[in-house]
Image (cartoon, rainbow, N blue to C red):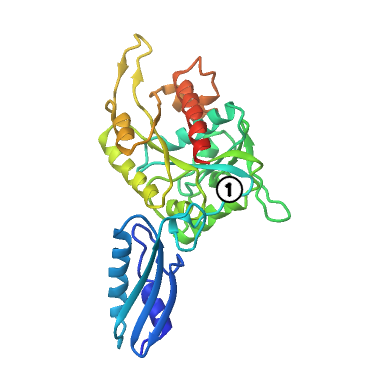
């Protein structure tokens, strides 16, 4: 006769569709009952997607069938509408707020090299320029760049109650693995430890009365991204892409990830949108034209901004004074970030 430990071990191999975590660790398994060799399992899922219960049923049945001596398998599903508040039955809502923070906004991309950290840094500064209190957390442990972009090697310190005090620069509260490492020191940690570091950055930092906390996510849809969207109550996400199709393909993967966990897409920012020749003002669409606008329409989200490709943007990031610090009347990129920030505030307020 199969034991409950055997049943739990089998169910622990069943991944929730689209996630790296299993239905047992998500808390979806509500009860397990055995009668001789027969097994009944109660599973609660909150979803609007009928494919989710079907896939879980197929995987769970296959996993349980592999247990030696098992008899009849009966899976009882309790399917509910997703709730807005945290619930152990809803992976999309297994989230809590971060102390000291009103709105948490994730900046994401499906691939690297599209300027996501540049957008994160400048968007944070543009939000700060509106009078908001803003923090920026660099969630890219393996390639942290925020410390360099803000021109500081200051080390954070901890209080007696183990709260990390964020670094202050240009009016922002900052946290990054880059503040903890030497310039040439690599981060060599496996997935579970990486997600632990991120949780410490988010929940053990003494974020001080922030209106907005910007999360600069690593590229892709891996463990760090999934941990954040599964555990942090996000106001929404902003997707960064460049105009060419190869970048848009990966941006759609990021959009799909947020869709699976019911995190709203606040908008899309097209970085390196075009180049304005300083000699004659002619506009060159080096990476293609209109890709961001078409994609924004396709996903039903606003195009928050089209950031021009400027040498000054790169220089500003390299020298620790991001371009958004400039008066928007003096620089096109700074103006584009300021406009995006104003739109973002309105959208975040609507989602609150």
Name the image quarter holding residue 20.
Answer: bottom left
The image position of residue 311, as x and y in percent, is 42, 22
Q: Which residue is mark 1?
A: 180
Closer-to-camera residue (132/181)? 132
Image spot of residue 180 (x, y percent): 58, 48
Above or below, comparing residue 94 to residue 254 in the picture: below
Q: Residue farthest to the top?
A: 280
How many discs appear? 1
Q: Residue at point 59% right, 42% down?
A: 102
Q: Choose between 328 and 34: the one closer to the eye.
A: 34
Q: Determine whether 227 is above or below 339 in the image.
A: below
Looking at the image, residue 49 sits to the left or right of residue 128; the answer is left
Describe the element under mark 1 as helix, strand or loop.
loop
The local crowd at label 1, few if under 14, some if 14 to 19, many if 20 or more residues have their Cα within 10 Å, is some
Q: Residue at x 36, y 87 (%)?
A: 2
Residue placed most toward the observer, 325 or 268: 268
Instruction: Tell me if I can see residue 320 in this picture.
Output: no
For this view, does 72 lie left or right of residue 237?
Answer: left
Q: Locate residue 93, reporting x and y percent.
A: 47, 55
320 relative position to 289: left or right = right
């Amino acid at each position: 006769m199969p034991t409950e430990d055997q049943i739990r071990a089998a169910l622990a191999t069943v991944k929730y569709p689209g996630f790296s975590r299993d239905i047992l660790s998500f808390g979806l398994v509500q009860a397990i009952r055995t009668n001789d060799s027969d097994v009944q399992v109660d599973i609660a899922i909150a979803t609007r997607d009928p494919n989710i219960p079907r896939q879980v049923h197929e995987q769970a049945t296959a996993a349980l069938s592999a247990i030696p001596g098992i008899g009849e398998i009966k899976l009882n599903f309790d399917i509910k509408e997703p709730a807005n508040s945290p619930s152990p039955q809803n992976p999309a809502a297994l989230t809590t707020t971060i102390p000291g923070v009103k709105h948490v906004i994730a900046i994401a991309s499906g691939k690297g090299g599209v300027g996501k950290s540049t957008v994160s840094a400048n968007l944070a500064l543009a939000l700060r320029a509106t009078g908001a209190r803003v923090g920026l957390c660099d969630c890219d442990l393996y390639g942290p760049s925020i410390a360099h972009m803000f021109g500081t090697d200051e080390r954070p310190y901890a209080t007696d109650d183990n709260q990390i005090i964020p670094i202050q620069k240009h009016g922002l509260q900052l946290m990054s693995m880059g503040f903890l490492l030497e310039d040439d020191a690599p981060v060599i940690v496996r997935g579970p430890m990486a997600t632990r570091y991120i949780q410490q950055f988010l929940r053990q930092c003494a974020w001080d009365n922030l209106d907005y906390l910007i999360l600069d996510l690593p590229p892709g849809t891996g463990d760090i991204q999934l941990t954040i969207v599964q555990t942090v109550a996000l106001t929404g996400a902003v997707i960064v892409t460049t105009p060419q199709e190869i970048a848009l393909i990966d941006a759609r993967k990021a959009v799909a990830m947020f869709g699976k966990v019911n995190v709203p897409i606040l908008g899309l920012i097209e970085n390196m949108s075009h180049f304005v020749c300083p000699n004659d003002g002619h506009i060159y669409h080096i990476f293609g034209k209109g890709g961001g606008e078409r994609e924004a329409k396709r996903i039903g989200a606003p195009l928050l901004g089209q950031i021009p490709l400027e040498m000054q943007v790169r220089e500003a990031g390299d020298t620790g004074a991001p371009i958004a610090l400039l008066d928007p009347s003096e620089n096109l990129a700074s103006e584009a970030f300021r406009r995006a920030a104003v739109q973002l505030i309105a959208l975040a307020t609507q989602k609150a």
